[in-house]
């Protein structure tokens, strides 16, 4: 079963707001209105590319390999920069090696999940441009 709005070729053919929303009353924000172009663009990047440090070449990675690489680096940075106590001996149980800087193009649900993930990992540098 295909989600509504998708044809057989997986191209978005229609986007609309929720007319029952008391906030938008069915109107789309600029991001929503541009989503069809973003998804259907012939220039859309659909493969994961990686450029090793000091390399001039990009290489394609599979999704599992890319996710493992990110997770390994995330956990290692957390471990390497872990602080049990601050300079005064107070327990802090945090990492200063991980930070998150979100943007206004990320929706509220994504920002909520990012905040929950980084808080659970005991990162303290969590900021979002949409808050400003």
Image (tube, rainbow, N blue to C red):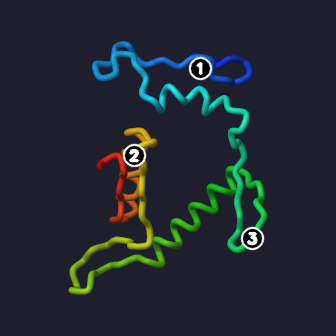
Whether residue 5 sits left or right of residue 56 in the image: it is left
Foreground label between 3 and 1: 3
Dot 3 crowding, Cα within 10 Å, few <14, some 14–19, many 20+:
few
Whether residue 36 sits left or right of residue 47 in the image: it is left
Vertical order, 46 against 99 (above or below): above
Vertical order, 89 against 58 (above or below): below
Q: Position of residue 19 (x, y in %)?
A: 38, 13
Q: Position of residue 65 (x, y in %)?
A: 69, 57
Q: Secondary structure at mark 2?
A: helix
The residue labelled by disc 3 is 55
Among the two numbered marks 3 and 2 on one chain, the one whose residue lies closer to the N terminus: 3
The residue labelled by disc 1 is 3
Foreground label between 3 and 2: 3
Whether residue 119 sits left or right of residue 38 in the image: it is left
Check the image and name the residue furthest to the top: 19
Q: Position of residue 64 (x, y in %)?
A: 68, 52
Q: Secondary structure at mark 3?
A: loop
Cβ–Cβ under 8 Å for marks 1 and 2: no
Cβ–Cβ under 8 Å for marks 3 and 2: no
Q: Choose top left, top right, bottom left or bottom right for residue 37.
A: top right
Foreground label between 1 and 2: 2
Dot 2 crowding, Cα within 10 Å, few <14, some 14–19, many 20+:
some
Distance Cα–Cα, label 3 vs label 1: 41 Å
Q: Residue at x 40, y 58 (%)?
A: 118
Identify which residue, 27 or 8, lies in the foreground.
27
Vertical order, 91 against 132 (above or below): below
Residue 111: which numbered mark, if any? 2
Q: Secondary structure at mark 1?
A: loop
């Amino acid at each position: 079963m295909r989600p509504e709005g998708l044809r057989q070729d997986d191209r978005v053919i229609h986007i609309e707001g929720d007319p029952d929303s008391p906030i938008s009353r069915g109107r789309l924000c600029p991001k929503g209105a541009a989503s069809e172009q973003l998804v259907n663009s012939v220039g859309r990047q659909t493969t994961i590319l990686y450029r090793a440090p000091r390399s001039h070449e990009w290489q394609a990675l599979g999704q599992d390999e890319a996710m493992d690489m990110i997770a390994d680096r995330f956990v290692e940075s957390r471990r390497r920069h872990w602080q049990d106590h601050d300079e005064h001996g107070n327990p802090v149980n945090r990492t200063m090696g991980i930070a998150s800087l979100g943007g206004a193009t990320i929706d509220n649900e994504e920002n909520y999940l990012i905040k929950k993930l980084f808080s659970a990992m005991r990162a303290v540098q969590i900021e979002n441009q949409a808050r400003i």
